[in-house]
Every structure is written in structure tokens, then in C-alpha cells.
Image: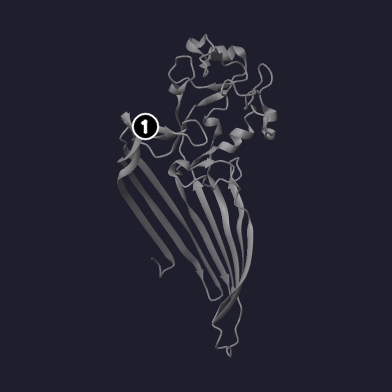
Amino acid sequence: YFFNNRLAFNADFFMSKTRDLLTLKTFDNPIGGINNYWTNGGALKNTGFELGLSGKPITGKRWMMEIGATMAHYKNKVTQLPNGNYTTSVYGDNNILTAVGHPVGLFYGYKTAGVLTTDAEAKSAGLNGSNYLYMVDAAGNRKNFTAGDMHFVDFNKDGMISEADKTIIGDPNPDVYGNVFAKVSYNRLTLDLGLTYSLGGDVYNYQRSVLNSGSTLYNQQVAETGRWRYEGQQAELPKLAYGDPLGNNRFSDRWIEDGSYLRLKTVTLTYQVPIPTTWSWLQGLSVWAEARNLATWTKYLGSDPEFSVGNSVLCQGIDAGLLAQGRSFLFGVKINL
């Protein structure tokens, strides 16, 4: 605290190491139909900090103002896995990566370079710039990517889009997060504002991957009107293809979005009712009104950037279309006897 308690600052730092994490291993020679067993073979390291700053620029007899903010950051890193790196399927095909030296729950999939606008462009994207990019389906058939298909990045330069081309495409852990608050009082009237924010966390918009797939008979979003339809067209969405034979809608950075947001979480107005001095049985009386989730500022295309599809650390940053947090309005009376 500084300047007669008109300015306050706090800083916290933490570091923890967790050993003997439960991990699932596989028997080399299964016995009695049991293929897997649990072992305490994992290790994890967490570090982070939280900073807080608040001040009272006005402290008069009638007017009082207090403002402040917090900023926090954390980082986790897997330091040991008994069977090496592995992937988990959560609303996707082996799309969540757990790897030594990386945070838990990274998004793991394909990178894209836009939509192939012409057949000539599709052909030049292949091996040595003279063959079509292609994939091999479950039946072993070769399928060429042509105009209107997604241009997936061929990282190993073999001309074929396969599991070998998957890479880290997003991190659901935010860079920083925290809150901002303000309190203004005039005589018996007090206004409190509370905002929350998160910056830098990626979101897998699974709901959009269904509503913008162009490959099923489900209703689609209006954005599908901008799909590729003719040779040479510059488009953000690939052509319609029932059943998605080329896997244009596979788990890729098409569905990874910036989940940063600023939300006006609470607004509270309180009035302290004057009490006659003869009412010794009543210590205080106030009436208040509160509004929650009034506004959210974000570039995220889903319904709500602040969510969790599950309690597991592997489920963070995945939007499966849960209901958004709604606005609510509350009124009350507080009586102190």
C-alpha cells in the first residue's frame, strides 16, 4: 500500500511440479483380454503469476472512486510420459495433442492455405509443382484435390496429404487473463462495474465445423453462400461435396479461432436508505439492482467465447455449441438487524 492506502499493488508467483500422474499404458503381450493398465508415469510442471493494481483517485466526503485491474498468466508443460507423445479425440479425429515439452491439450491437425481456385493451381500444389495434391481414402483409393477443394499444407513434401502432415495449430491456454473493476459513490448511491477479459487463447469452433461443412443435409449458416462455385473464384469456403470425400472439413486451422474477449460481467447500483436515529433495532437498509453479462466484445464467431465443454484439461477451448451465458437482471433489499 502507498500514499495513505490510496494506491495498492500486489504480485504473486507460483511454480509447482506434479509427479506420478495417471497415464494409460498398453501391455506388450495382453493377458486374459486385458490390453491396458494404469500407471503413475507422467509428470507436469506449472508456473504462473498474478498482478493486481488498485487506486482511489477520489476520496471526498461526498464523492469516492476506486478503480483497479488484475492480470494473470500461467504455463503448464508436460515433462514426462511413459509411452511418449499421444493424441486424443475430442469432437474430432485425434485432434488433441499431449506431448513432452508442450502444454497439455494443444490442438493438433492440418494447416490450410486457402481454397484452390483453379485446377491449374491444384496441380501446381502437388509434388514438384507438377502434380495434383492427393489423399488416399479408407479403401486405398487415390483422390486428387481439385479446384474448389481446400489447399492443405503438405509439410513433408511427398505430394500426399496424410497424418504425417498434421501439426500444432492452436493453444487453448490464454496469454493473459484477469478483470477490471470500478466503484463510484456519491453520498448514499454506489455504482460498481466489473469486467473480465482473456487474451490469446485459441478456440476450436466445433459448432461452426458442422454448420459450415457443406457436406451434409443439415441446415447450414448463411456463410455458405460464399462457397466456391466456379473456376477462378476467390472464396473462403470450399465447394459443396456431400459426404466430404476429400476431407475438406477435417480438423484443421479452418475451425481454430481467436477466443480473446472483454465482457461487462456485472453492473450493480446500490442505494443506502437513510434510517431514523430512533430505529435502534435497524442497523442498515439498502436496495440494489444488478445486471449480469450485459455486453461482450470479441471477434469469435461462436455464441460465447467463455465456456467449457467439459471438466477435463483436454476439453478446454472446445465449443460444441453449448448455450451462451444469458443476460440476467436482479433486484434486492438488504436489511441489517
Give the image's coloring scheme.
one colour
| Number of dots carrying numbers | 1
Amino acid marked by disc 1: Gly
Left or right, 17 with reference to 1: left
Left or right, 62 with reference to 13: right
Q: Quadrant of the C terminus?
A: bottom right
Residue extending furthest toward the top: 130
Of the pair 271 and 169, the residue shown nearer to us: 169
Query: In the figure, residue 148 lies in which quadrant?
Result: top right
Q: Residue at x 53, y 25 (%)?
A: 112
Looking at the picture, how far across and down is residue 292, in whole percent? 60, 58
Looking at the picture, how far across and down is residue 100, in whole percent? 34, 35
Looking at the picture, how far across and down is residue 178, in whole percent? 47, 53
Of the pair 151 and 30, the residue shown nearer to us: 30
Query: In the figure, residue 321 lies in which quadrant?
Result: top right
Q: Residue at x 50, y 42 (%)?
A: 317
Picture layout, residue 125 above or below residue 285: above
Q: Residue at x 56, y 12 (%)?
A: 123
Q: Quadrant of the N terminus?
A: bottom left
**In the rendered image, which residue does mark 1 sit on?**
33
